[in-house]
Amino acid sequence: MVATEQYVGSPVLRKEDAKLLTGQGNFVDNQSMAGMVWMALVRPPHVHATIQSIDTAAAASMPGVVGVYTAADLETAFPAALPMVWPITEDIKIPTHWPLTKDKIRFAGDAVAVVVAETREQAEDAAEMVTVSASDLPAVTDLEEAATDEVVIHEDLGTNVVVHWSHGGGGDQSVFDSAPVIVQERFTQPRLIPNAIEPRGCLAYGSPAAGEFTLVSATQIPHICRVGLSIATGVPQSKLRIIAPDVGGGFGSKLNVYAEEALALALTRSIGRPVKWIETRPENYVATIHGRGVLHDCTLAGTEDGEIQGMKFVELADMGAYFQLLTPGIPELGGWVYMGPYDTKAYWYEFKGIITNATPTDAYRGAGRPEATFVIERLVDAYARRIGMDPADVRRKNFLPPSAEAFASVMGLSIDSANYEPTFDRALELAEYDQMRKEQQARRDRGDTKQLGIGLSSYIEMCGLAPSEILGALRYVAGGWDAAEIECRPDGKVVVRTGTSPHGQGHETSWSQIVADGLGVTPDDVEVLHGDTSVSRLGMDTYGSRSASVGAEAVARALEKVRAKARTIAAHELEVAEDDLEWTDGAFRVSGAPDKARTIPELAASAWHAHALPADMEPMLEGTAVWDPPNFTWPGGTHICVVEVDTETGKTDIMRYVAVDDCGNVINPMIVEGQVQGGVAQGVAEALYEEALYDESGNLMSSSMTQYLVPTAVEIPSITQDRTVTPSTTNSLGVKGIGEAGTIASPPAVVNAVIDAVSHLGVSHIDKPASPERVWRAIRDAQGGAA
Amino acid sequence: MTNVSVTVNGQSREADVEPRTLLVYFLRETLGLTGTNVGCDTSTCGSCTVLVDGESVKSCTMLAAQADGRDVTTIEAMAHGDTMHPIQDAFHRNHGLQCGYCTPGMVMAAASYLQENPTPTEEDVREALEGNLCRCTGYQNIVKSILDAAGSMSGAPETTRA
Amino acid sequence: MIPAAFEYARAESIDHAIELLGGADDAKILAGGHSLLPLMKTRLAQPSLLVDISRIGDLSYVREDGDMVAIGALTRHHDVANSELLQQVAPIVADTASRIGDPQVRHVGTIGGSIAHADPAGDMGTVMVALGAQFAISAAAGATRTVAAGDFFQGLFQADLAANEVLTEIRVPKTSGGWSYLKFNRRAIDWAMVGVAAVQQNGSAAVALTNMGETPLRAAGVEEALAGGADPATASARADEGAAPPSDAFGSAEYRREVSKVLVRRALEETLG
Ligand SMILES: Cc1cc2nc3c(=O)[nH]c(=O)nc-3n(C[C@H](O)[C@H](O)[C@H](O)COP(=O)(O)OP(=O)(O)OC[C@H]3O[C@@H](n4cnc5c(N)ncnc54)[C@H](O)[C@@H]3O)c2cc1C
Ligand code: FES
Ligand code: FES
């Protein structure tokens, strides 16, 4: 059928939904195989300890147990340790990270043994029977304490301070001494637990005789996993297939190459039976990466009348006990946006990465950029308070000027396009900013128990990872390209293979909108395949809001190749020159004789039977593109939060939340809005509820969903949304990326609002999350200790 | 072993299971009904919500033996052939799901709740979902979906996407 | 996570339950399982036998009994919350039940299990203490006894209830005056960080606290102050007298003390008008 509708830009309902809504999702835990055995890991109740002995005998004799393995038993299974692919400096010290630890336990998730048994229950029962004798060492989970090296966690490295990266600065650094106003603040941001609702899990199987293996894994990155797991297990990439089935959310937590994946592969290779592992939630809390965990000393240099002259940030970042895939690179990812949307003259950013006795940190939704945006936006508010200006006026005064073209920024990279003020104005309008200020004043005048606060957050982010050349310069070991293949079947249907690996983002729908427009078919005619290295051969997967700007752009480029070939065939069949054809109403038509036409389905059939193709043309109407972007993309926007704070208990309720984002052109507004809603919810959670708390001995206190406060529908507000559109100059689609914007923008908007609500009581600082107790303490302290 | 006999989605199913078998694993592993998910192990997330005698229950916090002789409905029985249940349809039309992992639990919780209160307000719906976590959607479109479903199930005009 | 293995038996009657319980060393009653199973899944509890009492007929009811209302131990939170009788004559009980856990929990968890579990963060125990409820307990050889709520809670997860006894009925007095149960938590699904139950009683009020010690606590200082004519604002300053609140991921003991004062004042304002 010939479609004339324009699909890109409209809220096409998702193709993904039907199976997920009816319980037909294909999550890894839904898969089982004949002969399958279960794997359970032994994670002893130690945080930092030297292992004396591991007794597996009792476990090995339990019913159903196939084997119990320690690092010593698997010595030959792993030719290399687990990969870390971002050695950001030349002198970075890299802790060796084996799937099972050998000599020492360095964090609560460090596994010492793995049990394989016939059933899930038997594996769990036997894992309990493995006894480990280990002598405890002092545990350090505090960043500054770890940085003193009083307790060194990896003796071979000689220090916990394993990396120091400096941006090197931009602009005139003398303003930090000479500016009329210098604001200095210190901000801590706790560790966060990503909490995809589907825990991790994997199923490994294959043929030891053929040396071929497949790993089905709840991962965001099948293609990168293939490379990483090949290194760790020695299975050549050509014999290793990774399948990401339906994946129940990731947020960065499944952007990794994990010990359990390597173990399942190694064990299926040695046992010859399919091996399955499903993470429990408490296990997820210690063994899956955490995010954030940073401490910033910040300086803002400015004038008395609100002109920002310099911004400087010195960070300590908690790496955890080992590096996971990208650990040391995460702070650096933020290192390019510490000026926010502001036209600062001077820029400085550096960080030190510190090893601690806690779960490794890595990319959690936003990865580096929320950390940056939080401190910038808190600092700007502190500056506004200092000089007695409205925080909205300070922001407006300092925005970078609009530009439809890419332009150089003080931090050294080029920004693809910018227009921040209209976005800002729209947010103020939707939030009824002036009216809210009046309401706030009225409540202050009345001395109400419940006070109103208004918080602003203007942000930019760097996403669309990434130009391979820049990644190379930043010492990332892989590239940032992505790929797409489009295959037009003779029945008029189209198969698209994308290198992105969605897990909730709706790529099947969005990509098919692009293809439908380009080929004159409907989105339902297009099947988008992904998440299997044997199906989508080429790709770099889904993270860093890269899928649209890199992956969808690859689809658009493959589409151009298909259309070019189709045009050649059409011209050949219609016996006209290619230039005489125009694309109208979903078909190539002869100019002036629109009835002489060929649709893509017709041309696909011609190319398939190949009975009469132009000379030298290969059969099949298909096209492949591998796209390496020339630049990042740089979305931006302003979020405004209005809160009500109970000044007696410190409890905050969100009254209103406005998000106005500019992510360039939009393929599917419904999906874009959904991404922002989910992102904001995660940011609100970060601002008010969530933190991974450790006790003095380094044990995680917030060790399950009952103590780690993932908010419910009661706490999360409905938000008011709008967009402005400043197309990206990085790609032909003009898209920028929206997966992380909500999480990047919202934490400072909310925390600024909470502080604003009680600032008249003398409060100028509250740490994140702004829990009722923290707010109550801040008020009490500001009032001189009398609550 | 203990004998469990349950009516699941209208069919009577029987099996000998270990007493410790949780209803969710009985459904998923003994009966192969994998639509019901497990998300938390602490009775918090609601991914595992099914109906027992028509009411929402966290199937990870009930022994299969406790469900013996009772009537269990899972997500697999909500649609009739190609026709989705109005709640499922509303989730589709309102983009009430992203990764879809929490979704079966959300749909079942909503089904139970709308029987108790067919004409809820937004606040009612939010409170009714206090036992179901979603990490993707920020709940906004889930709440919208359920309000929309309530409208269409009670015959009122459907609210369309804003 | 899966509980460690155990035996399972279904009791046909209260006496049968008591007999079964006597037959194993570490047998446990299973009512709704919504406190017990989460503990068993983490393997913090590993009973060898579960005696499922949920099928015993006639332990799920709410009925008038003179000046009292009798509630069967197996009555689910959902049914307590929706009992028209309770809504009319002991509304604090119905309202509190409607705020326990979430709808799914309320569809399974029972009032008897809630009370027997003696969790200091549980809501119902506090309300029972404020109301001066009576608990009927059956023991071996057909023996029965009645315990006042104020005497029942003995320590952390410890009640005046032997391993082979069954709590069968909860009796609460009808109330006619004001009441309030305030539950302070971070998330809707969380247990009370602090809870306050207040019930009007001949011009004054009975006040009890949730999660301010190892058991539900009577706020004796507040009650004394009220009896002495103090207004809510003054009386509430004594809310944490004798309390020993925990410090945990939700809040410090110091903070809980302060919150208890604010909540007691607010609860009293609601209760006493
Ligand atoms: C996610 C979640 C959230 C919750 N939130 C709250 C909350 O906010 N507030 C709150 O108060 N509660 C909360 N609860 C607990 C809930 O109220 C439980 O239902 C209740 O505590 C136990 O009731 P049950 O019938 O499930 O008892 P079970 O779990 O079956 O039993 C609990 C204990 O009591 C014993 N027992 C049970 N019945 C009897 C009896 N008749 N005689 C003698 N002993 C008996 C059992 O042996 C066991 O030791 C929550 C539970 C969950 C899972
Ligand atoms: S899996 Fe049952 S509540 Fe989370
Ligand atoms: S849609 Fe992913 S958890 Fe709800």
Image: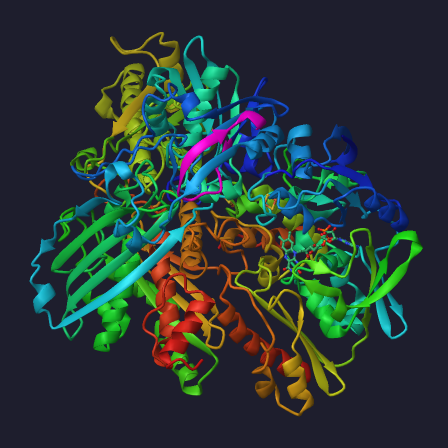
Vertical position of residue C266 compared to residue C256: above or below:
below
Q: Residue at x 44, y 30 (%)?
A: A260
Residue A196 lies, in percent from the top left, at: 47, 43
A590 w.r.t. C49: above or below: above
Q: How is the image coloured?
A: rainbow
In the rendered image of this protein, does residue A246 appear above or below residue A644? above
In percent of width and height, residue A326 lies at: 30, 38
Does residue A321 belong to the magenta stretch? no
Residue A21 relative to residue C169: left or right? left
Q: Is residue A50 magenta?
A: yes
Nearest the camera: A237 or A82? Answer: A82
**A121 sits to left or right of A601:** right
Looking at the image, which residue is at 50% across and 64% down?
C251
Query: Which part of the image, by quadrant, shows the C terminus of chain A?
Result: bottom left
Report which quarter residue A734 is drawn in: top left
Residue located 63% across and 39% down the image: B84
- Ligand 2 image position (quadrant): top right
- Residue A94 can be seen, yes or no: no
Magenta stretch, residue numbers: A41-58
Residue A117 is situated, as x and y percent measured from the top left of the image, at 58, 24
Left or right of A200 in this view: A257: left
- Residue lying at the far bottom of the rendered structure: C229
Of A136 and A522, the residue lying toward us: A136
Q: Is residue A626 above or below residue B124?
A: above
Quadrant for residue C80, please give it: bottom right
Of residues C32 and C247, the one nearer the viewer is C247
Q: Position of residue A674 (x, y in %)?
A: 44, 49
